[in-house]
Amino acid sequence: MKQNASPARETTTDPESRNLSRKFYNAAWRWHFYAGLYVVPFLLMLATTGLLMMYFNVIETRFGDRILASDGTRQSLETQAQAARASLPDATVSQYIAPIEDDLATMFLVDSGGKQHVVTLDPVTTEIRKTIVTDDSWFYWASDIHGELLIGDLGDRLIEIAAGLAIILIVTGLYMWWPRDGKGLRSVLWPDFRTTRRTFWKELHVTSGFYISVILFFFLITGLSWAGIWGGQFVQAWSTFPAEKWDNVPLSDDIHADMNHGALHDAPWGLEQTPMPASGSDAGALGLADGTPVNLDTITAFAHSIGFNGQFRVNLPRGENGVYTLSADTMSGDSVMPTGDHTIHIDQYSGKVLAEVGFADYSLGAKSMAVGTALHQGDLGWWNVIANTLFCLTVIFLCISGIVMWWLRRPSNSPISLSPPPMPKNLPLWKGAVFVMLALSLAFPLTGITLVTVLAIDVLIVSNVPVLKRAFG
């Protein structure tokens, strides 16, 4: 039996087959290398800022340490809001954040001087305990880098390109990881520590990359769903909650995304592009009892009466057609379980409920994003925080190990060369492989445009300029 098995094995590993396999391997390696040149700095940034955001989202608060309230009778929320407004020049209060615990101070978002401030005050004495500009808080600073690199839409687009290229890294990496040359699956599921220095780094890079590949893909997709082009123009538009489901409710020109603050997305993903209802009509279902004045205190009391507990938000009306909006969702760090997402709009004049949306009303895409965002942010408990921490640290290690592998492989006698893996010659079906890779990348438009541009530069410029050819050839 052993003698019969040997020839069969040789037919599948003859020199021609091994040569073809090596050519495809080198082609995948070259794609992997060039994608990594762009992606590695972004993955390092995303993993580092993600860790920082998770810390302030879960362990402390998005605005820093928790501040305790004094003992005694609390002032009305209207009185507290007036004190918050008076603490800054020409200020308006845009949001009240209910404390996650009863013994904590009150927080208001206050707009003043073209900036948004978080004003924390003692609910008993109305003494201002802390005031910060939201963009100056560690969480918002990390969030702005994480989403836009502090440069707005341009940063968003650059990160979107990086996320698309990172998916190419995953695909090519898995192809390169697959056992070949007679090796079994077990040999790549656990690194071989009996190796040279360079091979040692490769063993760790390949194995750890395999184990987090699916999780990395999940993080990239949930992140891309917030991106301006792939998310905002394609995926999110298909999954937006239809405002037509609100019966005979007048709609505003504003959308839910207008409630967001800077780079931070407060509105649930599936509602961002949905128009807001407008106050000032006879529409709406019973909310506040007839004759009840409509103000921050009565709106908050109504929220408690219908099940809003712990941390939730009350967005105050903006303009004559604005509404009071009650919301609690994992996107804002209010709740732990995404199935508890709840948004209600109330007419600022009549106190009637104009619209109400919960997790059950979301589309499949919006439900997936609500759960995905909670996992992405580490909102689902300490197991989620620990898992995300290990994941981010592994991503950082993959980036560093990739740089180390390149450094050990580069030729010391060619300082201007990036030493990319050589493009194999006479590669069968290479056009088909390029088509498949482009089709994958074109599923993400900015990435596809980037790849086509790079290929054009490679063919028209790099291949014809000796210095560039030596550096990138």
Image (spheres, helix red, strand yellow):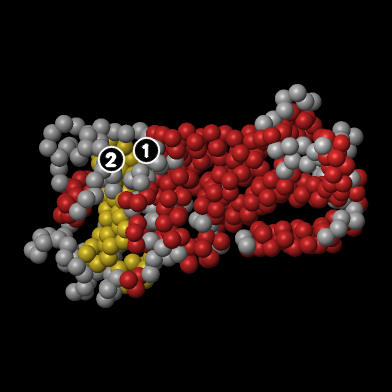
Quadrant housing residue 131: top left
Residue ID at (69%, 30%):
191
Q: Residue furthest front?
A: 1
Residue 93 at least partly seen: no
Callouts 2 and 1 close, C-beta under 8 Å: yes
> Tag 2: Cα neighbours inside 10 Å, few (<14), some, or many (≥20)?
some
User: What numbered label is drawn on residue 61?
Assistant: 1
Q: Nearer the viewer, residue 194 or 272?
A: 194
Residue 190: give x, y in percent of width and height: 67, 31
Q: Which residue is mark 2?
A: 100
Q: Residue furthest top?
A: 194
Task: Indicate the amino acid at tag 2.
Answer: Ile
Residue 214 at least partly seen: yes
Q: Nearer the viewer, residue 199 or 401?
A: 199
Q: Tell me if 125 is positioned left or right of 35 in this view.
A: left
Q: Residue furthest left?
A: 291
Q: CA distance from mark 2 to mark 1?
A: 10 Å
Please, is residue 342 above or below residue 4 in the view? below
Task: Indicate the amino acid at tag 1.
Answer: Thr
Residue 227: give x, y in percent of width and height: 53, 57
